Amino acid sequence: MTPRAADRARYDRATAPLDAPFAIVDLDAFDANAQDLSRRAGGKPVRVASKSVRCRALLERALAKDGFAGLMSFTLAESLWLARSGFEDVLLAYPSADRTGYAELAGDPKLAAAVTVMVDDPAQLDLIDASRGGGREVVRVCLELDTSLRLLGGRVRVGALRSPLRSPAQVADLARAVTRRPGFEVVGIMGYEGHVAGVGDSVAGRPLRSRAIRLMQSAARRELAERRAAVVREVRAVVPDLEFVNGGGTGSVQHTAAEDAVTEIAAGSGLYVPRLFDNYTSFSGRPAALFAQPVVRRPGVGVVTVLGGGYPASGPAGPDRLPVPYLPEGLRYDAQEGPGEVQTPLVGPPADDLLIGDRVWFRHAKAGELCERFDELHLVEGDRVTATVPTYRGEGRTFL
């Protein structure tokens, strides 16, 4: 029996009383992935990206482990909710226009101490001030650095369109603007190199493309390490007691941790290891989050149909944004239909061994987005479900 076949048998035994569809997290795999993230971080703390987990119980489990400290959230409303739930260090990774949330933040000492907001433009400070509603608490601010690689004199950009702050002088100028403004405090710098951390460098069947990605990423790491160090030097001249410099992501943990200027690493997807993180030469994880769909039809030889399953991930549309049939091995989508909203035909030799009511196990393309489809996660240890915990959705929290 192959390791994947053994996992399938184990998951089927553990969840035998449950009616699919449902989602699980294999805690043995989750814990092993957490240990690997911490190892690759080389002693620097890992800040957990909440959008890649979207389950308070599993955020708490990760933060209870050595080598993990703090959360990186994705909306202000989520940040405030997490802070009220007892999480004491929440970095909001994206600027917000949530006026109600800013009023709550500025009016509550506990929230103001726990939550740090992201800024890359003085206009965002104006919005926060206009939203205070009489609240006088100091707002903790993190400045975001553009990490993209610019080639051919800037005519070619590789990387996400995020912050307008690129040069050390630009970031330092905004730091000075914040320090001169009552009610704000600069506490950190963040830079997310998604073109390194979120792009696999070993694409199956594409050796030339894979080599090109590796060359690009090597150049990007060198350029960013030099620029980020210069940014940190200039900002520390303005804010000597800067608390943190955050960088990286699941796919670049060890590379970003090697930069002296970086004090902490952000990662989250590496806990669940969705399919987009299969194509890396620098690490390999264990798939921990899966969902099961029931077989409801057998249209013909070599074909079964499961209920639902059309859960595409965000990003540029393409086959890599689709869930992948994972267990049993050897199933694939029908080319004319693909994964559907209410039914998904699957073809391949294993189909003939599946009966009505059997499960097909899938992996989502991304990590936390799976939790927008399910109210709860069944936590599997060995061949037993040892707990069932709510996702954000299960707690009535759909932030985006």
Image (cartoon, rainbow, N blue to C red):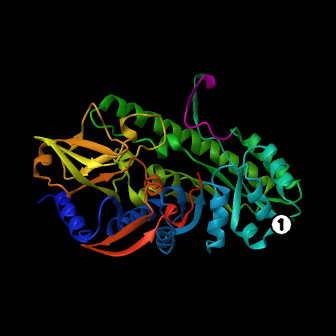
Which residue in the structure is indicated by mark 1? 137
User: Is residue 244 shown in magenta?
Assistant: no
Query: Residue 215 placed where, x, y %?
Result: 43, 34
Query: At x 18% / y 60%, what residue is drawn?
Result: 3
Q: Quadrant of residue 379?
A: bottom left
Q: Which residues are magenta?
A: 153-163
Q: Nearer the viewer, residue 126 or 44?
A: 126
Secondary-structure class at tag 1: loop
Q: Amino acid at mark 1?
A: Glu
Figure label count: 1
Q: Nearer the viewer, residue 324 or 268?
A: 324
Query: Residue 10 placed where, x, y %?
Result: 21, 67
Query: Residue 59 placed where, x, y %?
Result: 50, 68
Query: Residue 96 placed where, x, y %?
Result: 70, 50
- Which of the image's four quarters has the N terminus? bottom left
| Left or right: where 177 falls relative to 62 | right
Q: Quadrant of residue 86?
A: bottom right
